[in-house]
Image (tube, helix red, strand yellow):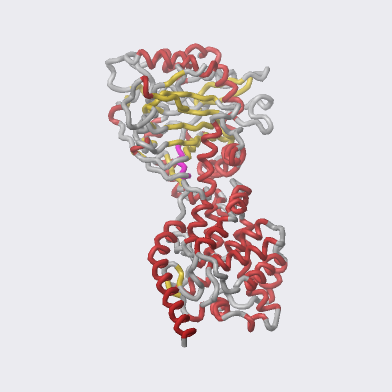
Amino acid sequence: ERERERESEREREKRARLRTLRRWTSRIAMAASHHRADVDVVPQLQALYAANARLFYDTAAPSTSRPPEMREQVSFIGHALQAARHARASGDREAEVASLLHDVGWIIEHRPGHDADVLTSHDKRVQLAKHDTLGANYLRDLGFPERVAKLVEGHVRAKRYLCYKEADYEAKLSAASTFTLQHQGGRMTAEEAQAFEADPDFQLQCDMRRWDEAAKEADDDATAEQLVARMAAFSDTLAACLDSALFEPRPQFDAKKIVTAEMRRQLKEDGYVVLKRAQWLTAHEAHALAAFAEDAKTDAHAFLSMEVVRASADVDADVAATRTVCARAENVRHCPTKRVGPRLLAGDRLKSICKELRQWKADATIFKDKINYKYPGGSGGYFAHQDAYFKLWRTEDGKAMAGGMLGEEDVCVCMMAVDAADEANGCPEIAPGLHKLGWAGIGLPSEDQGARKQVFESEYGTVVEELQNPHTKQTLSMAIVAAKHACAPDRAGLKRKEPAGDAQEQAGDAVLDPSAIKYKPLRMGTGDVLIYGNFMPHRSAPNTHESRPRRALFAIYAPRDAFPSPEDSVLKGEEEAADIYYEWEAQYRRKDNGKGIGGKPNIYFDGVATVVE
């Protein structure tokens, strides 16, 4: 009788503990399963499991009770840890990670817009039966290797295969596995089994199924805290697995799948398009951008521009309370941190997206790469302007030269949000549709802006004659307009000047009033990318937020056939346009740390620049 009373008391304590856990678990699980790209993936994933530390298969998931036919006698974390221990003996890190996470699909929340092609029923039991596919897609989005995702899917395929292959296997399944089998396709057909056997990881997936079955021993007396600590011991393994897949080719990021006809229309008509992070980056890749942005400032190839900001957002700006910070780093694609430089900036993912958006016939080349830093305390923004990137070539003796603007559709400026951006920390602002004006001189200094005009002429005016392109007989139009055709102070607008391209003659004298332009702020999340062309007017305000930085990573691309091309001198072999561009920059604007332009990133910068000797 005393034993029965003790057992009843244990059951009451267990139910009370579970009621408490359910109250906070659903909230934590919801936050963790809808992961944030600006937070490290591993702690988020561990928080998801920690939220379910003592939830058993026979009690409840974060937001639903399991029916009797789906009960097991082991907790989620206990089952995961047991499966991973079995897998560790294989010496295969990806198999160990897949075994640890193979049931993550049971505990993540349904993600609207992501899982519609998987979930065919509103019945929670049927949805849970699809945990292999839901979990695999979730891990893909986090950034785990494709092989890990396939192994997670494979533990259910292996169950279906073994039911086909072994006469008594299905009879040995637990009630929960028997129930889910009917919603997972049932036993395989002979044709399905033959295809599965041809998979390079066929045997490993069968092994994972055996480990899964062996990992259902009742939990020991470990507390929830101890189970969480055991899960945390896998942190380094999870992080290394995620890092191994950074910016690798992925089926879900095929440019032909990403780019739609509507995106092409928007880029053509409105002049810009925004890709959300999940459309082209994993969560771990987006998080890696911040580490790259900070390390790039110390890369030996980088050109740096510095500025002075307040030392603290809580004090007034004065000489005694300021600090010098980086405003821009250029030529950063050589920085190896997190593979961002060689794999993302110089790699194929963004290049192929730009090529598909613009329908370029030639492959894309990276023209320029940079990071704009806006730190709290008043880091400067940029006046409204047009980029107006230009053509590049080499002289017969190999000297880098530039001159003559590229066309609007010859350029894709890709601005990647390293940090979430809004009006408070200086998000980008664009003028939709005004790219159709072509080169309108927006942002060029007028005669009444003597200081800016002097800086501009220091940047370009002294090298105008050298910049004439012998192949097209064009000069760098921006320099000519600034040095010789600046607007008079009594003009209400700026003369519109189209680039004199190979098949495009100079346009007329249409007048544009820059004060009438309406700019649209674009709020962006970490990892989102804004893509626009060569003549889109844009600007951004200083960062006035007290604590949030706003860093933006830029990669500018053009088709390789957009440059004058005497066969022996332009973009030969594997050379990128950026290789020529930064050789040219080192001779002029970036010479002596940009001393000629007062250390500014460019003439449109409105912060307090300083030259670092």
Q: Is residue 530 magenta?
A: yes
Residue 493's quadrant in the figure? top left
Residue at the spot 39% in from the left edge and 38% down from the top edge: 548
Q: Hey, which residue is sitting farthest front in the picture?
A: 2
Q: How many marks?
A: 0
Report x, y in % for residue 337.
59, 38
Residue 94's quadrant in the figure? bottom right
Of 335 and 314, the residue lying toward us: 314
Of 585 and 284, the residue lying toward us: 284
Residue at the spot 35% in from the left edge and 36% down from the top edge: 545
Q: Is residue 566 visible?
A: yes
Residue at the spot 49% in from the left edge and 54% down from the top edge: 44
Q: Is residue 158 magenta?
A: no
Report x, y in % for residue 581.
57, 25
Question: Magenta part mainly helix, strand or loop?
Answer: strand
Residue 419's quadrant in the figure? top left
Q: Is residue 433 visible?
A: no
Report x, y in % for residue 235.
58, 53
Q: Is residue 9 above or below residue 388?
A: below
Q: Which residues are magenta?
A: 527-532
Report x, y in % for residue 46.
52, 57
Of 23 and 204, the residue lying toward us: 23
